[in-house]
Amino acid sequence: MSADNDSREQWGTRLGFILAAIGSAVGLGNIWRFPYMTAESGGASFVIVYLFLLFLIGIPVMIAEFVIGRNAKLSPVKALSSSGVADWKPIGILFVFTGFLILSYYSVVAGWTLQYMVDSAGGVVTNYSPDVYFAAISQGQRSVFFHLFFMLITAGIVLSGVKRGIEKSVKFLIPTLVFLLMGLAVWAYFRPGAAAGYEFYLSPRTDLLFSENYNFLDINLLANAAGQTFFTLSLGMGAMITYSSYLSSNDDLVEETLIISLSNVSIAFLAGLIVFPIISAYNIFPLEAGQLPESTVSTLFQAIPQAFKSIGGFWGSFFSFVFFGCLFLAALTSAISLLEVVTSSLIDEFNLSRKLSVTISSVSIFLLGVPAALNTGWLGMADKIANNILLLSGGFFITIYAGWVMKEAAVELKKGLSIPVAQLWLGLIRYFIPIIMLSVLLLSFWEFSYEMLQEALPANA
Ligand code: TRP
């Protein structure tokens, strides 16, 4: 154990920890996945359910991961086993598997951002219509190549030192990203035809409350919103347990959770304020129930370049380069946290050296991601399974552990706490959250099996 602890780094300051957690949370989930899920799940109705779940479930579960990590000061797998109650190893395996699967396609999408960067520098991106360019680079050899390239960079960083790299890049990255996103949002606001985009994004269709396609109570919408909550906050697979295992006991975990999750959701919200007005202004696809294109994985990559193409010339390419550069870096700080959980668990479990563990994990993650790099349909499917089933299951077990197995959870939370919410939190994590999560999970399974059945059955039978 001790050798392993030596090889893992520690956050020197409170700010270091907060920045690292923000670095993990802010990533493709905010800027690529959030608009794509919103487009797919019915616009403003989805946004409302998502915000609701974020506050009611996301924040308490993040606190739970922090409480577990700080209390045990061990990697996720060992932390859950430290109570001595029952064998939590299968949950550790679930975490590692989830990390493998998420990073395998995350790296493919991050590879796209790299391609946009390189090709913006070459002036290529703004020369083509965004859908033509996206179709050319998103599936096939070049996509595999950049997926490999991204995995190599991630592995290199996890091998050679995480802390300074993350702290430094996040400090400059988040402000730049926010600044650019704000600029783009203002630009998008002035496009003729933007109004319909805001309408879709911000005003819930109460008339469609119980209709077939947009429905607050729609299972798909509910599962997507829950999955997105976990994905965007990096919850459900032990990443935040790992990051908080180096905290000191005088940190205010609730305050930190609020800072991290509010920064995170603001960035996602801002991305939507760009993507939806552009989609409607440029008719990228109709924002109407039942008319969405088959794969909305491309939503961001079609909408944003449209803005840069309209600006055109040197500045169009310049802004495009900077934007995708920031997105790439945001993806990198998240990918690092995913790979860190996977490798540190392998080190703990099999006593591997860090080098060997990073090598084995990165090679297998690369291979697992190849199908996603060849086919965006596969990518969407892996994304759905990872989020709507695996992260939700992981999150469920985390709440059970914090609420019922760990005896000292509330006591741990009270250390350093400035607002007296420990009992409220414990109540939520014990009763309310597990029940909601189990219901969403069961519904999600049901929805999933129903989808597979529909695919298997002949049409119009
Ligand atoms: N939260 C990151 C994003 O939004 C992705 C991520 C990083 C993640 N670490 C994670 C998701 C752990 C789930 C679990 O892009």
Image (cartoon, rainbow, N blue to C red):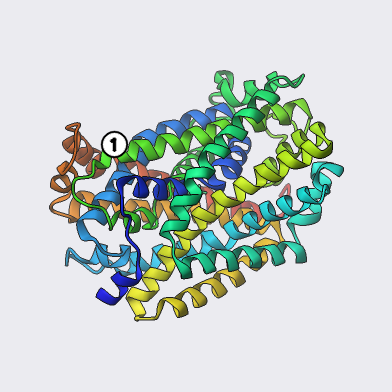
Q: Amino acid at mark 1?
A: Glu
In this image, 424 relative to 263: left or right? left
The image shows a total of numbered marks equal to 1
Q: Reply above or below: 411 against 349.
A: above
- Give the position of the N terminus as an image quadrant: bottom left
Count residues near mark 1 (Cα–Cα under 10 Å), then give few for <14, some for 14-19, many for 20+. Answer: some
Q: Reply above or below: 270 against 152.
A: above
Secondary structure of the residue carrying tag 1 is: helix
In this image, 251 relative to 361: left or right? left
**Looking at the image, which is closer to me, 417 or 122?**
122
Q: Residue furthest right?
A: 127
Give how far across and how far down residue 259 sits, in percent: 36, 36
Is the shortest distance between ligand 1 and the CB of mark 1 under 8 Å? Answer: no
* Residue 449 visible in the current orientation: no
**Looking at the image, which is closer to me, 86 or 163?**
163
**Looking at the image, which is closer to me, 218 or 330?**
330
Residue 180: quadrant of the picture: top right
- Residue drawn at x 71%, y 37% is 304
Give how far across and how far down residue 178 sits, in percent: 55, 35
Give how far across and how far down residue 223 sits, in percent: 48, 43
Give how far across and how far down residue 9 sits, in percent: 35, 63
In this image, 265 relative to 145: left or right? left
- Residue drawn at x 44%, y 61% is 162
Q: Reply above or below: 216 against 461.
A: above
- Residue drawn at x 78%, y 42% is 317
* Residue 50 visible in the current orientation: yes
Residue 22: quadrant of the picture: top left
**Looking at the image, which is closer to me, 161 or 101?**
161
Which residue does the numbered mark 1 point to in the structure image? Answer: 255
